[in-house]
Each structure stands twice: as structure tokens, then as C-alpha cells.
């Protein structure tokens, strides 16, 4: 938006022209002046929230916030046989964790509730009755066994299975007779020829002649639950949804939905179908890939901002493709008209680098840095609690210092509790005897190193320390530099192998280096 305003506010451009340009832009998105922008994210709680769902939710969220609108979470739980325990709670939990909480939802409530479709059955029944009264729908008495035979016969003939519309033209007398025997039939919608064309905000003009390729669809099942087609139309209407941003897999169903809107006498929303999010190799993201669920990323220490950044970076909707955008920047820079119809290829191997960028950004804010210190303290306590002989390594000042020193070398806080960084949190149980076994000059080496951290030399850098340690080795005749480094590494970490000694010293800091070496000499 900032870039757009700079172009529009070039010298000599009157404000009236600016207003007309912005007005045309709003009109191209189907935003009526004075009308509220309302969008919805409507997943089924048949699984936990994953990256594909997060992307759809994010585009809805940033579109709503960019235009001063509302973001609704509606859970489509009409298929009761496929519900996953805890999925409904997980979806809303993860949206809040990601920083894109809904304005209205099952948990938060709102003026258009309830927000669980299983609690809106009366609305669907009313809509089905209205369609029955006008003849736009009819009752279907076909048994599951007959429908299964139709499907098998079509497949045997290498045809696409479709309902043969057998119950479409039953007479009122036939319907009454069948109702006496089967009082709870399904309800089917009567598809019409010449489905309306529509202008999708991403894919342009579309029309799908569904009546020529499909049988009349069930809109209300015999158990009183609706199918997706009726439920989404009824709910979008009653919730005042102005724009439907959903996955491109629903593009071919939109003509069917528009027929339902027309039959019910309702004004449809504007549609924008989002291209699919695919793996880097072009394969489809699958829920069977356990690592696409958001809670896995959260548990692994990835930041919400990094995930939001990478799933928008790999797609479209922005004038420039750049890394490191924050949520406020995503909102201001988002342009729905820039979304292309090409699938977005997600390269999760780049996620650590995205996370590094966002971690460094958070560390620049005092409040966020304090929260990160607390998180790292908890991680250290969990990882090294049984090995930690001294609580000094959990001192907030020490933990903060470690994070700031290592921020350019890590992608996640969890990296700092990996085996390679265990020396930061566990003081080794090393004594004079162990050091003496490594070098007969252990005392001399230790005292020389202690001298490096006295007075103004306290702020030695890694490069300066490397030079000083090399000089120390050269001054000790008959002592190899590698032996000096091994001795110091054991004194500082208790391990003969690990990171470079100078890097360890800088990370630990002067006080901790002196503490560990003095302790080793006195033990």
C-alpha cells in the first residue's frame, strides 16, 4: 500500500485523482462503498491445522484487516463420522498462536453465531424447505444400495459416476406414498442448464455447466445434516460474508453454488480462489506428512512470523518477493489482484533461514527479547536440569547475553540446547588431575588464559582470542597448539571435542570462563 500511495501521490497528481484510483481499485475487488468486508476461514475439524490451512486463513485475515473488515472462523463439522477429537480446539489454538486470531469464532462468539455447522441445522432445513416449495429441490428416496450399484456400473463402463436423477420427476402422489414408507428422505437440488458465469478475482471469468456432467446433488441428507454445497451457501449468506477466499479445488463447484444462491433469491459474495500450496517438487501437501501440522513447527521452535512469511513468500499477492516481512507489513503490502493462478511451491528447507531473520528481529525488541529469554530458560531447565550443578547459567542476564552473542549462528532457540551448545549450560566436573594428564604445563596455560580476561581485555573478540591463544602456544616450547586447545576445551566443557575454544570463550563470557578455569585448578 505504501508503494501504491507513492505512485499515486506523485507531483502534480490531484487528490481527486487519487480518490478515483483508490475507488476503482476497491471496485475491482467487489468492495461496495459503505459495506462491511467480511471473510471466513471454514475448515472441517477432521484433522489438525496444517500449512495449507494456515495459508488460506492468512490470506483471509490480511484481506480483512487491510480493508477494515472482520475475519470469521466457522467450523464445518457436518460429517460427524470423520471428526478428530481435539481438532476444533487445535485449529483455533493454532490461529491464535500464529497471531491471526478470528474476530468471530466458536470460542469467541459473535453476532452471526453459532459458528459450528452442527449447531445450525435449523437454518439448513429452512433453506431446503424453501427450495422444495419452489420446485428447485426434490426429495430422493434412493437407497444407499441403489446408489452404490449406479456408481459401480459407471466405473465398469469407464464413465464418471453420477446420479441418474431418478426421483426428480416423481408425481406428488408418488412422493406421498414413498414418504409414508420412508419419512426421512434426502433432498436433492435440481441443477439447471446455463449456469451463471462469474468473475473470479484470481482466475477471471468462469462458468461450469454442472448439469451436463453431474447428477442432481444431495443438499440435505436423511439424517438432517447438510452437505457442503448447501451449508456454505446458507452460512455465507446469514453471516454476511462479502468475499469468499478459498482453495482452487472449489472453483468448479462455484457455478453450482451460484445456482443455489439464485434459487434462494440471495445475492452471492465475490469469489477469489487461491492456487494450491504444493511441495517444492510439485507434489501435493498431504496430511500424512506429519511435519506439515502447525503444532509440530511450534514444538520445534519455529516462530509464527517465519511461517507466515514463508507461505506468502512462495506464492503471490505482493508487488515484491522479499524475505522477512512481518504481519503488519503483510497486511499493508497485500494486493489480492496480484495473486496468480500458478500453484505456490513451498521449500521448507528455507524455513530455518526465515526463522533466523525473524528471531533476530524479535531480539531487537526489549519486550520480545525478555520473552525469548524466559523461553530459553525453560528449554535449558528441561534439557539440562539433572546435569546443572549451579543455577548461575539460568541467570537472565547470562541467558540474554548468550542469545545475543549467538543470534547470528542459530535459527531456533532449540539450537542453543543442542549437544554442540551443552557447554553453555553445564559446568564440567574437571579438576587439576584431568588437566595435568593432558599437559604438564596445565597450570601455566590456565594462568596465562586467566590473564587474558583481566582489566581492559575483558571485551576480547573471537578473532583477538584466536591470535592470543596462538601466541600462548608459540611461547610454550614443546607444546603443540592443538594440545593447548584440547586442554582448554576440556576445562571449559569437559569434552575433548566441540566448538572452537575462542568461540566458547566469547559465548561463555569472561566471568564464566574465569569461574570454570579457577574451579578446575582448585579441584
Image (cartoon, grey):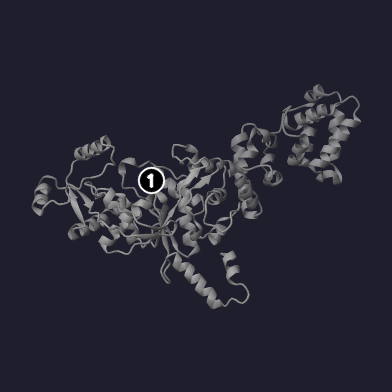
Taking the image as shown, residue 80 lies to the left or right of residue 437, namely left
Q: Is residue 389 visible?
A: no
Q: Nearer the viewer, residue 282 or 75?
A: 282
Quadrant location, the C terminus: top right
The answer to whether one can see residue 69 in this image is yes
Q: Residues within 10 Å of mark 1 (few under 14, many from 20)?
A: many
The image quarter in which residue 15 lies = bottom right
- Name above or below for residue 516 compared with residue 62: above
> x and y percent of residue 385 in the render?
61, 35
Residue 370 on image: x %, y %? 63, 50
Decide if residue 277 is on the left or right side of residue 11.
left
The N terminus lies in quadrant: bottom right
Q: In the figure, residue 163 lies in which quadrant?
A: top left
Please tell me which residue is depicted at 59% across the width and 64% down the height of the picture.
Answer: 3
Give the camera-side residue of 445 and 268: 268
Q: Residue furthest top?
A: 437
Amino acid at each position: 500500500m505504501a508503494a501504491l500511495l507513492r505512485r499515486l501521490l506523485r507531483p502534480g497528481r490531484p487528490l481527486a485523482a487519487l480518490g478515483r484510483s483508490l475507488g476503482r481499485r476497491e471496485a475491482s475487488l467487489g468492495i461496495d462503498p459503505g459495506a462491511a468486508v467480511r471473510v471466513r476461514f471454514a475448515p472441517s475439524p477432521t484433522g489438525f491445522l496444517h500449512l495449507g490451512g494456515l495459508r488460506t486463513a492468512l490470506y483471509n485475515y490480511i484481506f480483512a484487516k487491510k480493508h477494515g473488515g472482520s475475519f470469521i472462523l466457522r467450523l464445518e463439522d457436518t460429517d460427524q463420522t470423520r471428526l478428530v477429537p481435539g481438532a476444533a480446539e487445535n485449529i483455533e489454538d493454532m490461529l491464535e498462536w500464529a497471531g491471526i486470531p478470528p474476530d468471530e469464532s466458536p470460542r469467541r462468539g459473535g453476532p452471526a453465531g453459532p459458528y459450528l455447522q452442527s449447531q445450525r441445522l435449523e437454518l439448513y432445513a429452512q433453506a431446503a424447505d424453501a427450495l422444495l416449495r419452489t420446485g428447485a429441490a426434490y426429495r430422493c428416496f434412493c437407497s444407499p444400495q441403489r446408489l452404490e450399484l449406479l456408481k459401480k456400473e459407471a466405473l465398469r463402463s469407464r464413465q464418471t459416476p453420477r446420479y441418474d436423477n431418478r426421483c426428480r420427476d416423481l408425481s406428488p402422489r408418488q412422493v406421498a406414498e414413498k414418504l409414508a414408507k420412508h419419512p426421512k428422505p434426502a433432498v436433492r437440488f435440481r441443477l439447471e442448464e446455463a449456469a451463471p458465469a462469474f468473475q473470479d478475482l484470481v482466475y477471471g471469468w468462469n462458468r461450469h455447466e454442472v448439469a451436463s456432467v453431474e447428477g442432481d446433488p444431495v443438499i440435505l441428507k436423511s439424517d438432517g445434516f447438510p452437505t457442503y454445497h448447501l451449508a456454505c451457501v446458507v452460512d455465507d449468506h446469514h453471516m454476511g460474508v462479502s468475499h469468499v477466499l478459498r482453495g482452487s479445488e472449489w472453483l468448479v463447484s462455484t457455478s453450482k453454488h451460484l445456482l443455489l444462491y439464485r434459487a434462494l433469491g440471495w445475492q452471492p459474495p465475490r469469489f477469489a480462489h487461491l492456487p494450491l500450496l504444493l511441495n517444492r517438487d510439485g507434489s501435493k501437501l498431504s496430511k500424512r506428512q506429519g511435519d506439515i501440522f502447525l503444532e509440530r513447527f511450534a514444538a520445534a521452535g519455529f516462530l509464527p512470523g517465519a511461517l507466515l512469511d514463508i507461505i506468502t513468500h512462495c506464492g503471490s499477492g505482493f508487488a515484491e518477493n522479499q524475505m522477512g516481512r512481518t504481519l503488519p507489513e503483510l497486511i499493508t503490502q497485500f494486493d489480492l489482484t496480484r495473486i496468480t493462478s500458478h500453484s505456490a511451491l513451498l521449500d521448507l528447507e528455507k524455513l530455518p533461514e526465515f526463522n533466523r531473520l525473524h528471531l533476530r528481529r524479535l531480539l531487537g525488541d526489549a519486550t520480545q527479547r525478555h520473552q525469548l529469554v524466559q523461553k530459553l530458560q525453560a528449554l535449558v531447565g528441561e534439557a539440562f536440569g539433572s546435569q546443572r550443578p549451579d543455577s548461575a547459567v539460568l541467570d537472565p542476564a547470562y541467558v540474554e547475553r548468550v542469545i545475543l552473542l549467538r543470534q547470528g549462528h542459530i535459527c531456533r532457540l532449540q539450537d542453543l540446547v543442542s549437544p554442540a551448545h551443552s557447554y553453555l549450560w553445564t559446568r564440567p566436573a574437571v579438576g587439576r588431575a584431568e588437566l595435568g594428564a593432558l599437559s604438564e604445563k596445565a597450570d601455566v596455560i590456565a594462568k596465562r588464559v586467566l590473564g587474558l580476561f583481566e582489566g581492559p581485555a575483558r571485551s576480547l573478540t573471537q578473532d583477538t582470542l584466536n591470535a592470543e591463544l596462538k601466541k600462548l602456544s608459540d611461547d610454550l616450547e614443546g607444546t603443540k597448539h592443538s594440545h593447548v586447545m584440547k586442554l582448554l576445551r576440556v576445562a571449559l566443557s569437559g569434552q575433548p571435542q566441540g566448538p572452537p575454544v575462542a568461540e566458547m570463550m566469547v559465548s561463555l563470557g569472561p566471568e564464566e570462563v574465569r569461574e570454570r578455569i579457577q574451579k578446575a585448578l582448585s579441584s
